[in-house]
Amino acid sequence: MTDEHFEAQFPDTAREREIGEIIAYVKDGSSCQLIGLPGVSRSTVLGFLSYNGKIRHKHLGAAQKNIHFVDVDFSEIRHRSLFDVMKFLFLNLTESLRERGLQEENKVVGDKFREHLSFNDELVLFQGFKEAIDYLALEKQVITVFLFNRFEEYVPTVTSEFFSNLRILRNRAKYRFAIVFSLNRPLENLLEPTLLADYYEFVAGHAVYVSLHDEVFSRHRLAFIEKVTGRKISSERLQKILSLTGGHGKLTKLAVESLITQAHEPVAVAEYLLTQKTIKAAMNEIWQSLLPAEQASLIEGEYDDPEVSEYLHHVGLIKNNIIQIPLLTQFVENEYKSGGAIGQKIIFDSNTNTIRRGTLVLSDQLTSSEFRLLAYLLQHQDRVIEREELINIVWSGVKSTAGITDQAVDQLIFRVRRKVEEDANHPVHVHTIKGRGFKFTP
């Protein structure tokens, strides 16, 4: 790979734990998930694998020659068809081989891409993709690792066929094919089981959580800011910033950039930082990535739900039931303690085709099935919707709904509750009316 990318400049000890865990899964022939809050630099971690030769050599040694990483930004194809997605993956594979200087591999895979794309047919294109993976895995003995960056943005429109295609590719290449899904929470919690079923065994439970703070990473980024601005920040001021941000990558960077230009440190640093629009936006991004139950727990300071507590601990937002970003605590106190999104009505906006609670876009967390279910309930508030009616709406694209069980409906209802209720076990919005169906109360 070239050294033109920002990620290539970091020392080989940056994000050492996270990279080590990812590599362990890849070498074992497994896929995995890179999980973290917004702003903890998940994209940069993936960039290390693609563009930082020092880091690859540290973790892989000579074996790095036989492992090829392909960085794919799913934010660019978030609402695209499966054909477009497969075309995008195929194109990124071709371009990544060129960037790495693998001329022979680039020519063979590129020729296959252009030949099969010319038919403008999904099945023909996928056949070419399979041939490309076969060539790399069987003939060149290369492990191809796709890095699915910002995959959470594609989750609302992902289909079971997408994961079926991944399974086909993996079955052909065996241990020479892997995916690293970059997300804000595990796939098992985002998707209904039927969607993930074909790839479940290769990725479920394989989670690498990105910590809020990495000292080597922060030190290098600080040096870069100082170089660009031509200013230095004192160790005392830096420690003050870290104590407020918990070392969270994006918040720390924004706070340093804001304070490094100030001749004198503000008397009340936290209050000053909370007036900065970029910092408020970054904290709001964290807040809106959380589910209502998680937001409620942070506001109330109570973590009785094991699933809520486990996630918040894993991503580093709480430790020993204490929020690890003091600045976020004050932000929530100012913006949401008196109401905010919590307690506001859930609404369906037909103009934007989104479901919201205050400023929180709930539909960003929903799969297509969950969205159809909740949207229909919202459009028929306070009316009991029978199971059969709901099945016909949610599974409208299925040829026959005869095999859809009551258990499948109940599981879908519970998944929606986990994403919109403050307490899924004691719902106040999505009610089960025994013997009749379901009802939504706004």
Image (cartoon, rainbow, N blue to C red):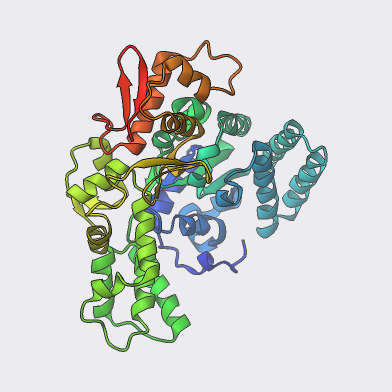
The image position of residue 109, as x and y in percent, is 74, 45
Between residues 328 and 110, which one lies in front from this camera angle?
328
Q: Is residue 434 visible?
A: yes
Instruction: Name the residue at 41% across, 62% down.
Output: 14
The residue closer to the viewer here, 253 or 98, is 253
Q: Residue at x 40, y 41 (%)?
A: 347
Residue 343 position (above or below residue 203): below
Q: Nearer the viewer, residue 441 or 268?
A: 441
Q: Is residue 119 left or right of residue 351?
A: right
Q: Residue at point 32% right, 31% down?
A: 441
Left or right: where does residue 209 sit relative to residue 85? left
Q: Which part of the image, by quadrant, shows the N terminus?
A: bottom right
Which image quarter holds the C terminus? top left
- Residue 391 drawn above or below residue 217: above
The image quadrant that residue 439 belongs to is top left
Q: Position of residue 238 (x, y in %)?
A: 28, 75
Q: Nearer the viewer, residue 174 or 343?
A: 343
Specify whether 260 is left or right of 354: left
Q: Residue furthest bottom?
A: 263
Quadrant housing residue 143: top right
- Badge count: 0
Q: Position of residue 118 (x, y in %)?
A: 82, 41
Is 9 drawn above or below residue 32 in the view shown?
below
- Say if 435 sits above or below 208 in the image: above
Q: Position of residue 382 (x, y in %)?
A: 35, 27
Horizontally, residue 60 falls left or right of residue 139, namely left
Res 249 seen here: no
